Image (cartoon, helix red, strand yellow):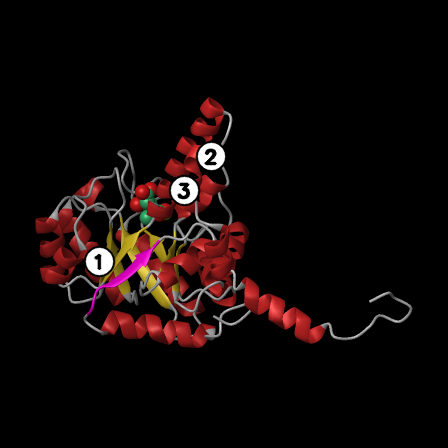
Amino acid sequence: MRLFSSGVTDADKRKALRAGLASGDLQRWPGAFSPLVAKIVADAGFEGVYVSGAALSADLGLPDIGLTTLTEVAARGGAIARATDLPTLIDADTGFGEPMSAARTVAALEDAGLAGCHLEDQVNPKRCGHLDGKEVVPTTEMVRRLGAAVSARRDENFVICARTDARGVEGLDAAIARATEYAAAGADLIFTEALADLDEFARFRDAVDVPLLANMTEFGKSELLTADQLRSIGYNAVIYPVTTLRLAMGAVESGLAAIAADGTQAGVVDRMQHRARLYEFLQYADYNAFDSEIFTYSRPGGTS
Ligand SMILES: C[C@](O)(C(=O)O)[C@H](CC(=O)O)C(=O)O
Ligand SMILES: [Mg+2]
């Protein structure tokens, strides 16, 4: 990583995302709820970063029911994307409005430095894809949403991923039929939301020949499949969307409980990321060197 921002251009990140999807290898994209987490994802050797709508809204103290705005999502997603050399795919929910808004969403996310986004076929206001009581729009409406998004793309390598939530509403066959239509409308990648188990993922894979993304979110409707299982059936990408947030918040809760009970954090210090490790991720030493090279002059009339 260079200082201040990524050393890889947005265009090159999008090329890398495309190449990954075409490689035949499973692309693993853990969710990063902050720019610092994106740096840790890169350091851990993953192929890309995911920005989750659920995590982004939870971080604002809000449920994931379509309350966040394009401005909030693009700003936070852009900060996360710039913190890493990896490509970043972002959750654009239903596109923040009607098809024209979905088009504007793509333009804004491109400007923010994202490598791709997903749009889902739920009605507004949307729900988490792993809850009951979701509703989907008619296929024709989603095709319009996607068509508008595709037409707004200026970088042909910006990935437009279509998510279908239909499995939990209309069944697997209907979800597969929708995916076929969405690919014909220009979607580069299909997000197969809330399938039940390996058999359903394999049936989806066999039925379509577009790149497919699996969502391995915890406490949801899908069996948690391993990367090897997903590789074995030919899936192209997997997200762990809220995993880092759940890990971190679990640690925050238990750490605060320990301080409240013990009157000191001494007992949990060994579970913390060390100051020295944090500074490695932040390239503290490189920033210090930059600073000392630039500020080599004396201020007129000053004491240094
Ligand atoms: C992928 C998802 O859209 C997200 O916002 O991260 C969520 C994840 C979750 O709520 O567990 C979803 O699957 O709807
Ligand atoms: Mg979401």
Region rendered in magenta? 25-30
Q: Magenta region's main secondary structure?
A: strand
Please name which of the two marks, 1 or 3, marks the residue nearer to the observer. Answer: 3
- Amino acid residing under circle 2: Ala
State the SS at label 3: helix
Left/right of residue 119 with respect to residue 78 in the rendered view? left
User: Which badge, 2 or 1, comes first in the chain's sequence?
Assistant: 1
Q: Which residue is mark 3?
A: 270
Residue 233 visible in this rendered orientation of the protein: no
Residue ID at (45%, 75%): 8
In this picture, is 151 found above or below 73? below
Q: Marks 1 and 2: in contact by CB < 8 Å?
A: no
Q: Which residue is mark 1?
A: 179
Q: Which residue is mark 2?
A: 266
Please name which of the two marks, 2 or 1, marks the residue nearer to the observer. Answer: 2
Q: Give the spatial CA distance, label 2 vs label 1.
A: 53 Å
Q: Is residue 27 magenta?
A: yes
State the SS at label 1: helix
Left/right of residue 212 with respect to residue 11 in the rendered view? left
Q: Residue 243 got which mark?
A: none
Left/right of residue 101 with respect to residue 120 in the rendered view? right
- Amino acid residing under circle 1: Ala
- Crowding around mark 1 (Cα neighbors within 10 Å: few <14, some 14 to 19, many 20+) is many
Q: Is residue 225 magenta?
A: no
Q: At which x and y percent is residue 120?
A: 33, 51
Q: Give the spatial CA distance, label 1 vs label 3.
A: 47 Å
State the SS at label 2: helix
- Crowding around mark 2 (Cα neighbors within 10 Å: few <14, some 14 to 19, many 20+) is few
